[in-house]
Image (tube, rainbow, N blue to C red):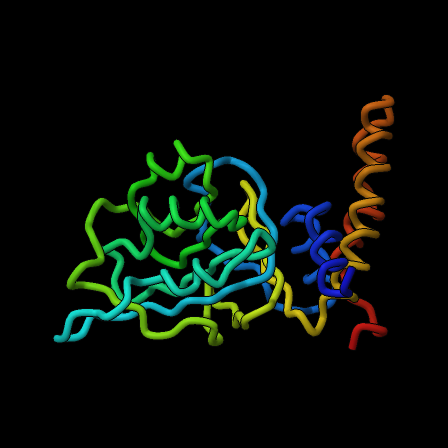
Amino acid sequence: MSSDDAALVRLQALDTCTVSDALDRLGLPGTALGIRQVSAARRIAGRVVPVRLGPAGDAPATRHLCSAAIEAATAANVIVVEHRSRDDAAGWGGLLSTAACVRGVAGTIVDGSVRDVDDSRALGYPVFARDVVPVTARGRVAEHAWNEPIVVGGVDVKPGDLVIADGSGVVFIDAARSDEVLDLAESIAALEAMMTTAVRNGTPVSQVMGRTYESMAERDSSDE
């Protein structure tokens, strides 16, 4: 197993809140605000295949948006779409979810609007988005680039970065910092598991969630 594959396996055992806490502790960006789960209520994690959408031009598009990314993606990937040029037209829909599901893609995250949510739910295909609309992209939105850096929820995202998404939101990890982020996230997860056990065993929550909990996301001089 490559080191990249090992990192993904480690990420799949975590959740967005724990990873966000680790990023806070390290003073790193990564949490994309305002993007929510709109279909298939389960956690996804993978390496990013990015797509950038923008206004449609005068000439008809030669390739449907996101199709190249779907055909390049695998089960280890999440398709992540920057779609901020307009919020009244969808940047992802049911046929794309069907194609991604056939490919075994882990899921799709759209910084913008999507449609055909019922279709995605019926497929069990996870889609995360900022909003839902029924309006088509045809004549309104086109693909401007794929497999190039994008910005999602204010976070700079590159091909191959790690992403995790669940009911609490979406969090990205810069591939170059993945080891230290995952190391810390795993330590935080282990501590929270012990705290949960203590509460279930009858320890007052005021004792469990004391200074230890409050200091979990604090930075110290060693992080500077």
64 relative position to 138: left or right: right
Observer-nearest of 57 and 25: 57
Q: Nearer the viewer, residue 69 or 38?
A: 69
The picture places residue 65, in percent across and down from the top left corner, at: 31, 63
At 57% from the left and 51% from the top, the residue drawn is: 75
| Up/down of 86 relative to 165, above or below | below
Q: In the picture, residue 67 is in which quadrant?
A: bottom left
Residue at position x 48%, y 63% in the image: 72
78 relative position to 39: left or right: right
Query: What is the quadrant of the N terminus in the image?
Result: bottom right
Q: Is residue 205 rendered to the left or right of residue 125?
A: right
Q: Position of residue 31 (x, y in %)?
A: 57, 59
**Residue drawn at (39%, 49%) of the image:** 99
Name the residue at 52% across, 72% down: 156
Q: Which of 142/41 is in front? A: 142
In the rendered image, residue 86, in percent from the top left (x then y), is placed at 25, 63
Residue 167: image location, x then y, percent: 54, 40
